[in-house]
Image (tube, grey):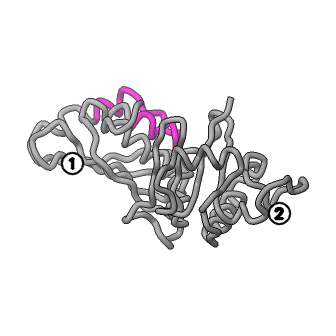
């Protein structure tokens, strides 16, 4: 089984679902050529060489002959048809945003635009922290799954270390996750509530940071777990 992701220059499309339907048929329509498209595509192939097998439309980075269709289609959009469980899916919208590209997921009708506070021209493989807010009863779930991402076996002793850490209003807490890379977890409850501010610091690359960001979203109820 596979799933599709579409990418185009941000703001270029008013109706993502309709546009994706046309692109699935190889009809770019009014999408104009944009240098960011090929720049993004080149970065995809550089990071994950196998992705060339899942890319449309055809471009010179693929070894087979060009099929029929607009000669400049690869300058207008990127379509990825990926196998389920492809390892770096969460990183793709982040990388696209760094190149000024929207990411559209037709499976859930979700359009992700570049974040105004995103990495921009920064080194995408030198991300220093990821932060967010999560429900207190989901904090253990979050740290356990972050531990899996970095090869750290989060267990009952880690849970015990957090017991009572937020009994007082305004309490804060720091906790190391000694994986690869090692991460420092900074936790704070800014006011009496069920929400905890979470900040994870360490030498993260794009893929790890995107995975942790997705986990924080799940732990905050923004996404399905």
* CA gap, disc 2 and disc 1: 51 Å
Q: Nearer the viewer, residue 124 or 106?
A: 106
Q: Quadrant of residue 177?
A: top left
Circles 2 and 1: CB atoms closer than 8 Å: no
Q: Residue at x 54, y 40 (%)?
A: 106
Q: Residues within 10 Å of mark 2 (few under 14, many from 20)?
A: few
Q: What is the quadrant of the N terminus in the image?
A: top right
N-terminal of the pair, mark 2 or mark 1, is 2
Query: Which range is magenta?
Result: 143-161
Q: Residue at x 71, y 50 (%)?
A: 26
Q: Measured along the vertical axis of the image, is residue 34 above or below residue 90?
A: below
Q: Nearer the viewer, residue 208 or 187?
A: 208
Q: Nearer the viewer, residue 157 or 165?
A: 165
Q: Residues within 10 Å of mark 1 (few under 14, many from 20)?
A: some
Please indicate whether residue 118 sits to the left or right of residue 163 in the image.
Answer: right
Q: SS class of the residue under badge 2?
A: loop
What residue is disc 1 on? Answer: 188
Q: Position of residue 219 (x, y in %)?
A: 34, 36
Q: Label for residue 60? A: 2
Please indicate whether residue 146 sits to the left or right of residue 84 in the image.
Answer: left
Q: Position of residue 122 (x, y in %)?
A: 49, 71
């Amino acid at each position: 089984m596979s799933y599709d992701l579409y990418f185009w220059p941000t703001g270029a499309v008013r109706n993502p679902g309709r546009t994706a339907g046309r692109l699935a048929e190889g009809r770019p329509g009014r999408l104009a050529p944009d240098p960011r498209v090929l720049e993004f595509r080149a970065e995809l192939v550089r990071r994950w060489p196998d992705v060339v097998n899942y890319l449309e439309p055809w471009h010179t980075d693929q070894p087979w002959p060009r099929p029929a269709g607009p000669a400049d289609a690869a300058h207008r959009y990127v379509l990825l048809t990926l196998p389920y469980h492809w390892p770096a899916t969460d990183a793709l919208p982040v990388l696209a945003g760094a190149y000024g590209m929207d990411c559209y997921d037709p499976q859930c009708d979700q359009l992700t635009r570049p974040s105004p506070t995103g990495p921009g021209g920064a080194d995408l493989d030198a991300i220093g922290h990821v932060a967010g807010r999560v429900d207190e009863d989901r904090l253990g779930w979050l740290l356990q799954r972050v531990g899996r991402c970095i090869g750290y076996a989060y267990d009952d002793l880690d849970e015990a270390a957090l017991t009572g850490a937020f009994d007082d209003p305004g309490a804060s807490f720091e906790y190391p996750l000694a994986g690869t890379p090692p991460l420092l977890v900074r936790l704070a409850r800014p006011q009496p509530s069920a929400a905890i501010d979470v900040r994870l610091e360490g030498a993260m690359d794009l893929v790890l940071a995107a995975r942790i960001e997705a986990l924080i979203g799940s732990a905050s109820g923004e996404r399905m777990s």
